[in-house]
Amino acid sequence: MTLPPPARTGMSLDEVDTPALLLDLDAFEHNLDTLDRTLAGRPVRIRPHAKSHKCPRIALAQMQRGAVGVCCQKVAEAEALVDGGVTDVMVSNEVVGAGKLAKLAALAKRARISVLADHPDAVDALATAVRGTGASIDVLVEVDVGAGRCGTLPGEPAAVLAAHIAGKPGLRFRGIHAYHGGAQHLRTPAERESAITSAVDQVKDTLAALKKHGLEAEIVTGAGTGTYLLEAASGIYNEIQPGSYVFMDADYGRNLEADGTPVHTFRHSLFVLATVMSRPTPTRAVVDAGLKAHSVDSGNPEVAGVPGAVFQRASDEHGTIQVASPFDLPLASKVKLIPGHCDPTVNLYDWLVCYRGNRVEDVWPISARGAFY
């Protein structure tokens, strides 16, 4: 059941019911502009990852600024995005199971759909699902370039799989997916550069193997918020997939610039708005946003705008904050929390409350919330 939105246009933030997921539109638009500015003159397409926001309104805003489409991770996410008007979606994941494949084939009659493969049996099942539907699906070989998750080995194994895809009616071999997820949160620039240099070398080996099979990768895609400039500068990648840049969570904020300072390319735009529900001691405030209001897999949220305040721990419905002054965070006051990890936090909410200054400007549905399948 989708709950009613916690806010209405024109409300002040003090009137918004909590916990609520906020989007600072000024910071959000700054982040969209910054991505464009940092990529100006580079021959790469932008295909942002929608698993971060799960929101067709954001996907369409990205495409209006020149993105060729978006990525998502699940078929149900792709359905929600296409229902919301998105015309080009890459499911940047393997899809297994007859039910899911049938839905993917049906979706490919409504929008341009691409998907990843790392095993010939999965390719065969996809070709079977498409047969007789009149649909066609673009397929990219996922190559493991260091993440240690899905993906075939680079070089010849990837090329053999690409040839298998190319021989299947209803499927189009489009290229290589080479995303190094583990590199995104390496803290120093040197660590990130080393990881992506290795990834690029493995992609080069794969492209050479494809050539021997008479194949060419039209698309070489990957990259994330932490490394996208490295892939863009490689001369090998021609498409990038940053997702979290629109929000910037606390964990990405711990990445470092070359001078050792926290990364500052993008601004924090996503917050969980919470209310102080208890003030039991001069140094402790308790808010109504606990484990069910934000994800702590990448650490606790940070407290925005209250110097010295530290979010110490969360239980199901409570968040405990240590404050520096007995006058900070009085009872019934509102506080913004910067999520440790934006993606799973967004997935907890049905609505994004979009604001400028202290006023709600709009409320956007998070249409793909809970789309796990």
Image (cartoon, rainbow, N blue to C red):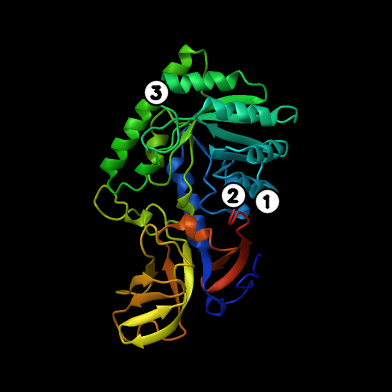
Residue 25 higher or lower than 373, as above or below: below
Nearest to N terminus: mark 2 or mark 3:
2
Tell which of 252 and 42 is nearer to you: 252
Residue 42: percent from left, percent from top? 45, 35
Q: Residues within 10 Å of mark 2 (few under 14, many from 20)?
A: many
Q: Is residue 84 visible?
A: yes
The quarter of the displayed image where residue 331 is located: bottom left
Dot 1 amino acid type? Gly
Residue tagged by mark 1?
A: 84
Left/right of residue 95 with respect to residue 112 in the rendered view: left
- What's under tag 2, amino acid-wise? Ala
Disc 3 from disc 1: Cα separation: 37 Å
Location of residue 283 with respect to 158 vertically, above or below: below
Kindly identify which numbered label has been placed on residue 59: 2
The image position of residue 223, as x and y in percent, is 43, 39
Quarter residue 113 falls in:
top right
Mark 1–mark 2 Cα distance, whole angstroms, equals: 9 Å
* Rendered residue at 60%/48% (across/down): 77
Numbered badge on residue 204: 3
